[in-house]
Image (spheres, rainbow, N blue to C red):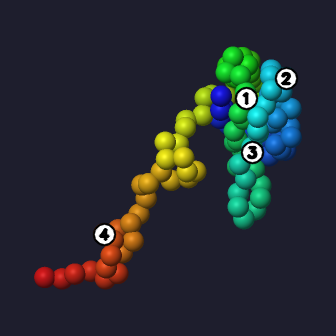
Amino acid sequence: MKLFVAGLSGDIDEIDLKEMFELYGEVKFAQVITDRQTRKSKGFGFVEMLKKEEAVEAMNLLNGVSIFGKKIVVQPAEENPSGRSGNSGGGRQGGYNGGGGNSRPRFR
């Protein structure tokens, strides 16, 4: 089961995050999301645990706990239906005013 973890201190790295959840069961992976340019934590991440029961227990026990002075939020991660990270198909289309194709307006 994949969990979303928010409210992380900038001092927490992936090893810390994994160790935090390993207290409740086997962790498949832990990831702290970082800014591409600065490489600093964005304050949230994801943890995937092998057994759903252990993930639910970890979520129930860690949600709202204060770590390094910040209260964390732990909840089930929303699965991206497209299987891609980031924007799921929305966003701007190319061209003038998002219309796609032409790079300049048409006048009648």
Residue, disc 2: 23
Q: Which amino acid does label 1 sit on?
A: Met
Q: Earlier in the sequence, mark 2 or mark 3?
A: 2
- Mark 1 is surrounded, within 10 Å at the Cα level, by few (under 14), some (14 to 19) or many (20 or more) other residues, namely many
In front of the other: 19 or 74: 19
- Residue 96 seen in the figure: no
Q: Which of marks 4 and 2 is nearer the N terminus?
A: 2
**Which disc number belongs to residue 49?**
1
The mark lying in front, picked from 1 and 4, is 1
Residue, disc 4: 99
- Mark 3 is surrounded, within 10 Å at the Cα level, by few (under 14), some (14 to 19) or many (20 or more) other residues, namely many
Residue pictured at 58% horizontal, 51% vertical: 85
**Measured Cα–Cα span from mark 1 to mark 2:** 11 Å
Determine whether the residue tagged by mark 1 lies in a helix, strand or loop. strand
Q: Where is residue 32 in the image (x, y as percent from the top left)?
A: 75, 45
Residue pictured at 55% horizontal, 35% vertical: 78
Q: Which of marks 1 and 2 is nearer the N terminus?
A: 2
Q: Residue 38's image quarter?
A: bottom right
Q: Which amino acid does label 2 sit on?
A: Leu
Picture quarter with the N terminus:
top right
